[in-house]
Image: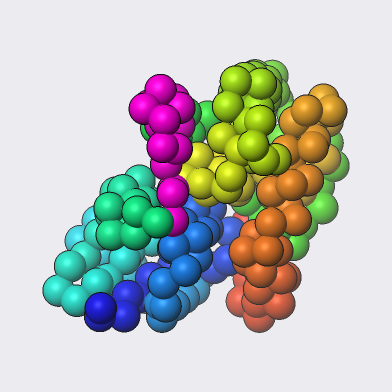
């Protein structure tokens, strides 16, 4: 099989890149990684060289280009069914897709007020009423999944899968901004932070030489 290339942004800031990268790591497939510094002046041209949407991540597999995170996850799930990115049970699988789509389309206040910044520590920053409402909805999702589907492991559907890929960047946000969680959500967040590929991403983010001052200073 042709080696895949995943085009991503800075690991410190790019939540969508993290989601696709975790899904690809979950497959166990070999891939090359191309990081585009999102703070560089020619970033738009650099990204457009790989992505028709002008956004990262982009999965390149031979002549194929997949430039949207959920589409990347679906492609990987089809190509690597042994990775079990989606639950086997149809009801659990439908639920996992629903909460992944909700993460994909929603939580605008959380994104705006608590942008991903792995290296930062900002307790209390961004805790607007709207962002807190997003956190409460996310916590509700996590509690419900753990209660209904999480008996076989510490993640949303037991084993680490696509839904966890979608929510992993939220876990890093909640850590950065010191958001308080109940015991069930804290246990899930801790399990996610201790998952080896997540630890690998965070370590790489901490070691990145690039920074984006307008985000770091906001």
The residue nearer to you, when weighing 82 against 111, is 82
Q: Which quarter of the figure is the N terminus placed in? A: bottom left
Q: How is the image coloured?
A: rainbow
Does the image show residue 88? yes
Question: Toward which corner of the image does residue 76 lie, by quadrant?
Answer: bottom left
On the image, the x and y values in percent for residue 99 come to: 47, 28
Q: Is residue 191 left or right of residue 159?
A: right
Question: At 65% from the left edge and 59% from the top edge, which residue is drawn?
Answer: 198
The residue nearer to you, when weighing 217 against 182, is 182
Q: Is residue 82 left or right of residue 118?
A: left
Residue 210 on the magenta span: no
On the image, the x and y values in percent for residue 106 come to: 46, 29
Question: At 58% from the left edge and 27% from the top edge, which residue is drawn?
Answer: 149
Does the image show residue 20? no
On the image, the x and y values in percent for residue 65 come to: 21, 65
Q: Which residues make up the magenta segment? A: 83-96
The residue nearer to you, when weighing 76 against 54, is 76
């Amino acid at each position: 099989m042709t080696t895949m290339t995943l085009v991503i942004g800075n690991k410190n800031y790019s939540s969508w890149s993290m989601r696709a990268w975790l899904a690809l790591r979950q497959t166990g497939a070999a891939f090359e990684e191309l990081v585009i510094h999102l703070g560089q002046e020619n970033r738009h041209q650099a990204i457009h060289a790989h992505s028709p949407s002008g956004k990262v991540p982009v999965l390149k597999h031979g002549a194929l280009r997949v430039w949207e995170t959920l589409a990347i996850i679906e492609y990987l799930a089809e190509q690597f069914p042994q990775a079990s990115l989606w639950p086997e049970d149809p009801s659990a699988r439908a639920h996992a897709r629903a909460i992944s789509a909700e993460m994909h389309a929603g939580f605008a206040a959380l994104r705006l007020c608590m942008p991903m910044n792995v290296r930062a520590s900002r307790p209390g920053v961004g805790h607007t009423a709207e962002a807190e409402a997003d956190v409460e909805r996310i916590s509700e999702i996590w509690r419900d999944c753990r209660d209904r589907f999480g008996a076989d492991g510490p993640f949303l559907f037991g084993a680490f899968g696509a839904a966890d890929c979608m929510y992993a960047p939220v876990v890093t946000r909640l850590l950065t901004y010191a958001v308080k969680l109940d015991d069930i959500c804290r246990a899930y967040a801790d399990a996610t932070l201790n998952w080896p590929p997540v630890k690998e991403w965070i370590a790489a983010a901490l070691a990145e030489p690039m920074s984006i001052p307008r985000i770091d200073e906001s």
